[in-house]
Image: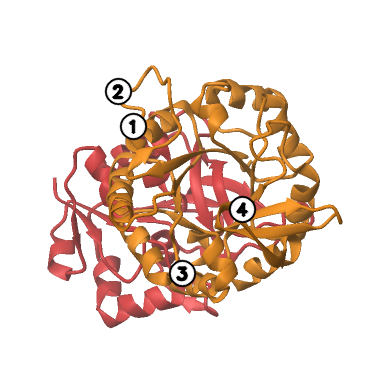
Chain colours: A red, B orange
Amino acid sequence: MKVVIIKYNAGNIFSVDYALRRLGVEATISGDADIIKSADKVIFPGVGEAETTMNYLREHGLDNVIKNLTQPTLGICIGMQLLCKSSEEGGNVECLGIFDEVVKRFVPNESIIKVPHMGWNTVTADPSSPLFKNLTNDPYFYYVHSYHATVGKDTIATTDYINQYSAALHKDNFYAVQFHPEKSGKVGEQLLKNFLEL
Amino acid sequence: MLAKRIIPCLDIKDGQTVKGVNFVNIRSVGDPVELGAEYSRLGADELVFLDITASHEGRKTFKDLVRRIAENISIPFTVGGGIHEIGDVDALLCAGADKVSINSAAIKNPDLISEVAKGFGSQVCTVAIDAKLDESGEWTCYLNGGRVATEKKLFAWAKEAQERGAGEILFTSMNHDGVKQGFANDALRVLSESLSIPVIASGGAGKMEHFKDVFTEGKADAALAASIFHFHEIAIPDLKKYLRDEGIPMRIV
């Protein structure tokens, strides 16, 4: 199986590579359109800012490459946000539009004042989703983010922090998670394994 | 619900853990990767590795170690010690660290916080503060592992660090550190209620009740400890179960 991790101007893509190696998978890290298109599975990870990363994807023609992927593709963190319709981060940035959801900033309320949402939080998933198979109910995943995708028809898992938001989305061949499976211990390993088995 | 975090801290010298004896399940307690993996297996939520090496060679060893940790451990980890400039941060993040902890360098050059936040994002930038409550009732910040007093006061400096882009504050009370009589809950509560970024409490853990107090009275988001974990005075699974039974949101593995 050929797994490609999309290389672009976002940080933290190597930890996904390390996590895959722990599962015995040697992934290719590449920003090359042909290499990405030829993969059996594509992972679109990263930590970054929406406007800067979207600009980079457009300048390098990766926006259309990603939109036209037909193999199972997993967006992680900023990767998930970029697969949504738009993001409030950096103004109102048009994103790839695979999912109809929009990405909004957390607005602190009276009981929760801390943004970013940082640490381990529970994820309530649709039990029929193959991405969440062989996991316990409401498992804890590791999060670090200040923006979140709204809940809608493509939502397959939610988390509550200040408000309820999409922890995971799924439409056709596209899957996306806001948390970091590569940093979520055994639970995260199981989720990555589930994705690789799709 | 967002869980409160339990964070073991490992001191590293020349690539080896300094504290850490008596672990039955692992081959070499001196190897930070093995010790870190054991803590991860036991349910630690994050790990902190502090490089206390002085030599140049030791620093290079630490960077190699950071890469091995990233390859082998599947929970987030922070590295600190010996960070003087943005290039040090870049090297450690490239080696695979999730966050860096900056202490003395941030006090000497507060612009470093802004540079790190701008270059790599606030989420990687933990500002560590060592402070001591003096006779006049003020918390004074110290440099170089608590050896040199500064003009900076804890609450003002923590606020400034946040405004400059720190993603978290790691506060060690020098009055409480090593005494095992509980954390500095009064100061922690003031910090936590006045900041919009998470606060990690350090210094003073002696028994399980102290962790309950630091989360309820001290309002801390995370608690860090070293020797009580290294010397098996408290086992992480027991601690987390106790805290969960006390109504504190905990991730149980």
Q: Amino acid at mark 4?
A: Gly
Task: Point out the frontmost of discs 2 and 4.
Answer: 4
Q: Which residue position is annotated with label 2? A: B27
* Secondary structure found at label 2: loop
Residue wearing tag 4: B146
Residue bearing mark 1: B34
Callout 4: 10 Å neighbours few (<14), some, many (20+)? some
Which residue is pictured at 71% across the width and 40% down the height? B176
Closer to the chain start, of discs 1 and 2, is 2
Q: Give the alpha-carbon distance from disc 4 to disc 3, as whole Å.
A: 50 Å
* Residue B247 appears in the rendering: no
Cα–Cα span, label 3 and label 1 = 43 Å
Distance (Cα) linking label 2 and label 3? 50 Å
Q: Residue furthest front?
A: B147
Point out the frontmost of discs 1 and 4. Answer: 4
Image quarter of residue A14 = bottom left
Q: Could you tell me which residue is drawn at 35 percent across and 32 percent down?
A: B30
